[in-house]
Image (cartoon, helix red, strand yellow):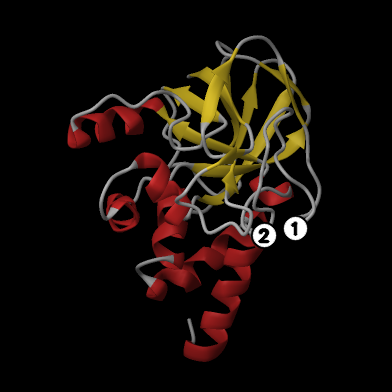
């Protein structure tokens, strides 16, 4: 398991975002050399946990529980076959493109050591939006992405440090439950009846998903 690329995005004007200023940082490109990773602060004020990566919509992106976004190269390859066109590392707006790691199948609360310093913890899957659809340029992209159920993973920073392309990735902790990123993603998007199952992940779960699960149980029972 290894890190194929570290990808950074910069503020860019585009016609397909609903950001009030018409900007996005989704167009991320691989970079060379070491990149610092650290907790950016609470959502709404903190941006990306990856130094040099710009987050334009702080309402929806960034913050401690979405500090880093990872996508498996294997999932990009699968989409390449389906779409019939090449997809470069970073095209999904991911900070980390990995190899040999089942990113969407990771457990909520699973921890990865990348290189010798950084430890990240899985919190949730990525919810597709209009900006993502416009960036990829495929019709019905949001619907297709949700149907696929391989959203990649958001991660929080447990131990900060530097990472670079080529670093080894090691799973250093796997929690004792069965709540995967894909399960969490399905529960908060297309299969709300799965929400009670998310509670098994406890505080490791992204706070917004944990709140949604508690509300569902309060209204409908477990």
Inter-mark Cα distance, 2 to 1: 5 Å
Give the structural element (helix, strand or loop) at label 1.
loop
Q: Are marks 2 and 1 in contact (CB under 8 Å)?
A: yes
Report whether residue 76 is seen.
yes
Say above or below: 166 vs 125: above
Q: Which residue is mark 2?
A: 59
Query: Residue at image x 64%, y 53%?
Result: 57
Report whether residue 178 is seen.
no
Residue 44's tag is 1
Say above or below: 124 vs 164: below
Query: Residue at image x 72%, y 49%?
Result: 63
Give the structural element (helix, strand or loop) at label 2.
loop
Query: Residue at image x 55%, y 63%?
Result: 200
Residue 8's tag is none
The furthest residue to the bottom: 219
Crowding near pointer 1: few (<14 within 10 Å), some, many (20+)? some
């Amino acid at each position: 398991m290894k890190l194929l690329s570290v990808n950074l995005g910069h503020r860019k004007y585009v016609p397909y975002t609903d950001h009030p200023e018409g900007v996005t940082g989704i167009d991320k490109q691989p970079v060379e050399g070491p990149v610092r990773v650290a907790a950016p602060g609470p959502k709404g004020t903190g941006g990306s946990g990856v130094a040099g990566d710009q987050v334009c919509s702080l309402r929806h992106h960034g913050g401690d529980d979405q500090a880093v976004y990872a996508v498996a190269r294997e999932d990009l390859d699968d989409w390449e076959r389906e779409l019939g066109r090449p997809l470069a590392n970073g095209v999904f707006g991911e900070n980390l493109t990995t190899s040999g790691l089942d990113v969407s199948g990771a457990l909520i609360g699973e921890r990865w050591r990348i290189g010798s310093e950084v430890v990240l913890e899985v919190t949730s899957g990525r919810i597709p939006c209009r900006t993502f659809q416009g960036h990829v340029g495929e019709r019905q992209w949001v619907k297709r992405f949700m149907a696929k159920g391989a959203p990649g993973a958001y991660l929080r920073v447990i131990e900060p440090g530097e990472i670079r392309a080529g670093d080894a990735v090691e799973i250093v902790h796997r929690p004792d439950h069965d709540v995967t990123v894909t399960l969490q993603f399905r529960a908060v998007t297309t299969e709300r009846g799965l929400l009670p199952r998310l509670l098994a992940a406890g505080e490791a779960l992204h706070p917004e998903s944990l709140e949604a699960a508690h509300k569902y149980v309060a209204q409908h029972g477990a």
